[in-house]
Amino acid sequence: MDLLHDARWRCLHIAPGSVEHPGDLPEDGCRLPVRIPGTAAGAIRETDGVAAARASSPDSDDWWFVTDVEVSGDGPWHLTFDGLATLAEVWVDGTCVATSESMFAPLTVVLDRLLSTTRIAIRCASLEAALRKRRPRGRWRSSLVSAQGLRWFRTTMLGRAPVYAGAPAPVGPWRPVRLVDSGEPVVLGRGIRTRVRGSDGIVDVDLVLAGAVVSEVAVEIGGAAAHSRPEYGPDGTARVRMQVTLPEVQRWWPHTYGDPNLYAAHILLDGHRMEPGTIGFRSVEQISGDGFGLRINDVDVFCRGLVWTPTDPITLNDSAGTRRILERCVSAGVDTIRIPGTMVYEDDGFYSACAELGIMVWQDVMLATTDPPDDPHFRSLLEDEVRALARRWGGNPAPVVMCGGSETEQQPAMLGLPETSTPALDDWLPAIVDRELPGTVWVSSSPSAPRGSDALPIAVGSGVAHYFGVGGYRRPLADVRAAGVRFAAECLAFSIPPSDTAIETAFGSVNVGGHHPRWKSAVPRDNGASWDFEDVRDHYVRTLFGVDPAEVRWSDPARYLALGRAAICEAFTEVLQYWRRSGSGCRGALILSARDLQPGAGWGVLDADGNPKAPWWVLARVFAPVTVLLTDDGLDGLRVDAINDTADVLDVTLQLQAHTPSGAVPVDVSVPLHLAPHETRVFSWASVTGGFTDVNFAYRFGPRTFDAATARLVDHAGAVLAESVHLVGGPARPVERGIGLTATARPVPDGWSVEVRTEGAAQYVHLDVTGGDLQDSWFHLPPGGSRTITVRACDPAATPIGRVGALNSATSVPIRVLPASDGHEVEG
């Protein structure tokens, strides 16, 4: 039984080093209630609000976390900490029983005697004070942080690097704390490994038991079982090893390529039943060559995903919010999440949810841009955290890549330093990953060159790349075709504005966009740079649409934001469609990043509340497992890629239409298409439609004939499985007084169906809706075209309220709602 399950914790902060013993804590100090697991910033948020928490500096002080617990029975008791951030002492009844120097390694203390009312106190020492101690310098200076001494501490860069503004440094017991008595058996250690042998699944189980003695241990998985009788040693512990074989096992797949099959595992310790979670079976291989890629269950996969940010950067504990975002990712075709070396290892619920939902995990070791010390103690701490992670992952098929950190090799390369060996990346970590995580692919760092290559780790055309040619380096969109990216572990970092509604809620007005200090504080900026990522966005507004963004912001702030969103959508479309199509040579695209850490125009494709921003809908269409891409290949015309990544056979119809400005459809061709599992078919527009038409206006023989081209995949029931609309003539289109937009909402089960129609070509149609969860936006419509969008009701009694606009329309229109009761339309 966990005696701390309902414990009430208090915390207080004092000057560094002013209190060395919990008995000397001031009685009149301000003691904040705090939820455990949690952080000092979380306690500040509970008392003073989120703004105070974001503005706090927890590293400046010592923090004490204290609770009293009623204890009965005989020992020993096991006091377990899954994570203490960062320099911590543990005191029990006035005695220091343990210390911790890593926020990523668990700690267990065995206690033989406890008072009937036991006081547990945790002192988290000021990291800022610890950084004042002089230590050997690294071979290079990190550009990410000012405090170069952080390289010696096993802690996160979150809250300590300026680029992550709005996220306070985590201090305190940020992972669960448990006090377990000896009245029942305790599993001190657990290791589960799965592998595939032929058609069988093999499970190796390794347990360390303590607490009440048990006579038999059983493991049951998928109808198969193994049994063992533990033998206890003089220290009161027993180690048990068993193997379970499952015949004709169903393999786990990323959701885009098949079903994420899992098996429930049960451990029985005499009459005590434990649920260690679900396990899965899959094979993973690294595709060899000059690039990088993954092969899952003997199928080459295109990894489409996001670089993860915690859903609650203040407490780092938000299981419900994390689950909600992961489910949203699945709906958008995301099948890979990378946890970068600047963040934290996520909790068990995260990795379990990824396995259940069919999301692959690329996990960085928490190293980022600094020089990892070649030091025995540092090595021991680093290896402890990887071992702990391996135990937590036991049997989970979702983690497929283990990586030696974020930009750990890039930083010295960009500083022009000669290539030197880094023991952590070259020796320690690959050895322990090979031993502890045999079912994962090892990558030395992100980015990095292929093994044995003489290429620099920053080269984007080989190995694992961080590609910001389109983005931070302001290259033209066509640069993606020349860059030759093989795998982008980071890409497409832009300062992305959230919706106007979100901006008005957080800032009071859209007029703050682009200049207000509160707005600017949330815009990402590289440490020491003379520009920020809003400048990058403005550059693409200027080059794509031929307008001065500053002038537009002065006269029409809402238009300025809309142009910025559209420019980013153009970049996402050009880059992702090219990488996704057959023959590009690219095997993965992970976008930086998933979600904003605070309200504003951050890197996230989701805002700080988890709601989609404009480019989210672009990536959802391109990342869909069944999709059709329509790309402009210049004088070769339009190219069509029909993609079926699923494990199912698809018999569909490919429809191609070309539209004139008047809405006429002189080209309208339908052909049957058989797509085998995991198959892509490539066509030229001319080959399908039966001849040359210069549909993309590449030859420019006279005036432009077509305004738009559309490709669809349609099933036998007439349902559109995928659609791509290409507007001919480029993104700079004149703004018209009206293009004949209309929008009508009708009730459907679980929400509303909104039909959007247009008379003229509609560029970047966008819906701003309250009262429901929008399922599509920021798309093109051809002249005379329409699209139906689902709005899932957040409240069954709510009616969707909002408007529909387009970038090339000077006016927006209200959504007109058709009630189910009387059939009369009312304005929404």
Image (cartoon, rainbow, N blue to C red):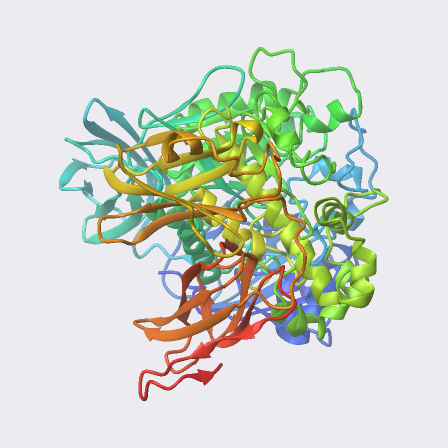
Residue that appears at 37% across and 58% down = 74
Q: Position of residue 81 (x, y in %)?
A: 51, 51
Q: Report whether 482 appears left or right of 189.
A: right
Rendering quarter of residue 157:
top right
* Nearer the observer, 203 or 134: 203
Please indicate, yes or no, whether residue 495 appears anywhere in the rendered image.
Answer: yes
Against 498, is 222 above or below? above
Residue 41 locus on image (x, y percent): 66, 63
For the point 51% across and 48% down, the residue is 708
Residue 766 is drawn in which quadrant?
bottom right
Q: Position of residue 819 (x, y in %)?
A: 36, 83
Above-or-below relation of 681 to 507: above
Q: 61 or 440: which is nearer to us?
A: 440
Q: Nearer the viewer, residue 445 or 562?
A: 562
Name the outermost residue toward the bottom: 822
Q: Position of residue 430 (x, y in %)?
A: 52, 22
Front one among 45 and 812: 812
Q: Picture quarter containing residue 205?
A: top left
Label tally: 0
The answer to whether one can see residue 99 in this image is no
- The residue at 14%/38% (across/down) is 224
Q: Quadrant of the N terminus?
A: bottom left
Give above or below for 809 relative to 132: below
Q: Residue furthest front?
A: 702
